[in-house]
Image (cartoon, helix red, strand yellow):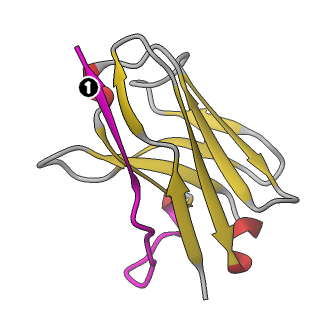
Amino acid sequence: QVQLVESGGGLVQAGGSLRLSCAASGSIFSSTMAWYRQAPGKQRVWVAIITTGGSTNYADSVKGRFTISRDNAKNTLYLQMNSLKPEDTAVYYCNKSPSLLNFRTSWGQGTQVTVSS
């Protein structure tokens, strides 16, 4: 059974940094992985994707500020977030890449990131 546990969120001032972690169990970590976020009243969207080989892709809104990485030996996904903005405020989740999601996909509890102005 797949289990995803996100951590590392918190309250930070604009311009600050946070590093999120996602511990994954099960076979999910053999996949391309992604970070997502869901702001209040909005849909969940992807922000960063990383293949098993380390190739990355970022949403335009975070490009140049966020860095996704993974430790395949530890089944852990990371998101380094720098130069945070109030609009980055959201609950952040990890999971397989968007193309691999379906209606049966399970999600973790997420981690709250709040950026104050």
Q: Residue at x 33, y 18 (%)?
A: 85
Comparing 29 with 3, the one in front is: 3
- Residue 30 image offset from top left, x and y in percent: 77, 68
User: Which image quarter: residue 97?
Assistant: bottom right
Query: Judging from the image, what secondary structure is the residue with disc 1 in?
Result: helix
Q: Which residue is mark 1?
A: 87
Q: Quadrant of the C terminus?
A: top left
- Residue type beneath disc 1: Glu
User: Which image quarter: residue 62?
Assistant: top left
Q: Residue at x 70, y 80 (%)?
A: 26
Task: Specify whether 111 is left or right of 2.
Answer: left
Comparing 26 with 33, the one in front is: 26
Task: Specify whether 96 is left or right of 29.
Answer: left
- Residue 50 image offset from top left, x and y in percent: 67, 46
Report the span colored magenta: 99-117
User: Which image quarter: residue 29?
Assistant: bottom right
The answer to whether 64 is drawn above or below residue 45 in the figure is above
Task: Specify whether 109 is left or right of 38.
Answer: right
- Residue 87 image offset from top left, x and y in percent: 26, 25
Q: Quadrant of the N terminus?
A: bottom right
Q: Residue at x 60, y 56 (%)?
A: 22
Q: Number of numbered discs present?
A: 1
Farthest residue, direction front: 11
The answer to whether 4 is drawn above or below residue 46 in the figure is below
Farthest residue, direction right: 73
Task: Specify whether 86 is left or right of 66.
Answer: left
- Residue 95 image offset from top left, x and y in percent: 53, 62
Residue 111 belongs to magenta span: yes
